[in-house]
Amino acid sequence: MAVHEFDLVILGGGSGGYAAALRAAELGKKVALIEKDKVGGTCLHRGCIPTKALLHAAEVADHVRTAASVGVTATLGGVDAAGVTAYREGIVAKKFKGLEGLIKARGITVIAGEGRLEKDRSVSVGDDRYVGADVVLATGSYSRSLPGLEIGGRILTSEQALALEEIPAKVIVLGGGVIGVEFASVWHSFGAEVTIVEALPHLVPNEDIVLSKGLERAFRRKGISYNLGVRFQKAEQDENQVTVTLEDGKTFTADYLLVAVGRGPATAGLGFEEAGATLDRGFVIVDEQLRTGVPGLWAVGDIVPGLQLAHRGFLQGIAVAERIAGMEVPALPESQIPRVTYCSPEVASVGITEEAAITAHGADAVVSYEYNLAGNGKSEIIGTGGTVKVVRQKDGPVLGVHLLGDRVGELITEGQLAVAWEAHPEDIAPLIHAHPTQSEALGEAFLALAGKPLHAL
């Protein structure tokens, strides 16, 4: 067995892994990056980037359908599934090539193969063993299913849905969270009949109730159906269709069933526990600095309990690389990480919901304000409704920012700055928001919470 020595060995080349590799190399470390598939991971190849390319294609289709409303004569002749696939794959290929170039330029050694953490904290790949002064675990996540629900045939994960070579006429989406509503939005815009089945009482149930209800109204107007508050019981399929039965006996039939019930940590069978790491339901337990209980062993990304977001893993990878290099890096609270769901309309948030704020501080100590995008000039121009909601502690800082509407994902960074810097609305209200922009809607909310509403009574 050949032994190869490095300053840092990283198991997993997704967002967290490659970010750690790039930053560590920049800081002068000799880095090995082990990846069994392609560097970039789920986000680049089967998640964030390809799904957002699909959502953009869906947005274009919707714009053509509604072109007459702005005086443009246009007709949607259909959606070319092969053409959409070529567009999507072209975006991914370009990003992948750029990432490969960056990794090569930084002198990072990429090892193609399935790695396993050994008891001595080295990583084995086939007959080779890679030893590092530090090791970062960044093995990512996989699409979950439900007990008794077998994936295959007409029952798909999100990865398999991306690989479909057709646009289904009728589809059921099991799960009304981020992945579920994004695919529902895409397929509806492409002309499919869509039904979402969600066991909890609302779509995007982790968001502020104002956003959940607003998205439900928007989907209802679009013609996207949903069934809420009843649990899935079983799914049956034949060569032509799949039928879903709920616990109340209601049934739905479609061409395909997308299972979008969340993602699990990809840690099974990789030797983590044998090497001394503590796992809880498959997640690697770390301290606030992302250290496991084993000296020199770190973990980042989707395998760490918390939000499973590419930009969270990316930031964690950078932080770990800097800590390994001896730098002081403060821990980032989960509440300061922005969240965006890229359906139409988009959902974006940072901080805590009003309900969570009341639980933490008491009803009398929490104040919120909602601004309707109908009053925002740029939103009216681009044809989107929606809501801006800001939650603050009474006479205190902004605790949460919650947005619903087309393109609001581009606004959430201002919300993140407000929450992370514990800004008071009075601090932000004097700042200028360019006119006409959607960012003015946030400005209006901060003005109102500062006691000087401009365009609201």
Image: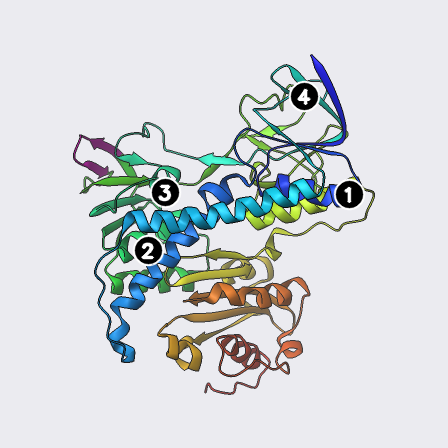
> Which of the 4 image quadrants contains residue 366?
bottom right
Q: Position of residue 27 (x, y in %)?
A: 79, 44
Task: Tell me which numbered mark, 3 or 1, is placed earlier along the sequence.
Answer: 3
Place residue 385 in its image quadrant.
bottom left
Which callout, 2 or 1, points at the residue further toward the start of the chain? 2
Q: Is residue 239 magenta?
A: yes
Q: Which residue is mark 2?
A: 185
Q: Marks 2 and 1: CB-CB under 8 Å?
A: no
Which percent across, then down, holds residue 254? Answer: 20, 42
Q: Which residue is mark 1?
A: 323
Name the residue type under label 4: Ala
Task: Inspect the image, locate mark 2, and give the three-letter code of the amino acid beneath it.
Answer: Ser
Q: CA distance from mark 3 to mark 1?
A: 37 Å
In primary-sequence order, the first of circles 2 and 4 is: 2
Ranked by sequence position, the earlier of labels 4 and 3 is: 3
Q: Is residue 346 above or below residue 375?
A: above
Q: What numbered label is drawn on residue 162?
A: 3
Question: So how many labels did they put on this image?
Answer: 4
Above or below: residue 306 compared with residue 378: above
Please tell me whether residue 396 belongs to the stretch shown in magenta.
Answer: no
Q: Nearer the viewer, mark 2 or mark 3?
A: 3
Magenta stretch bounds = 234-245
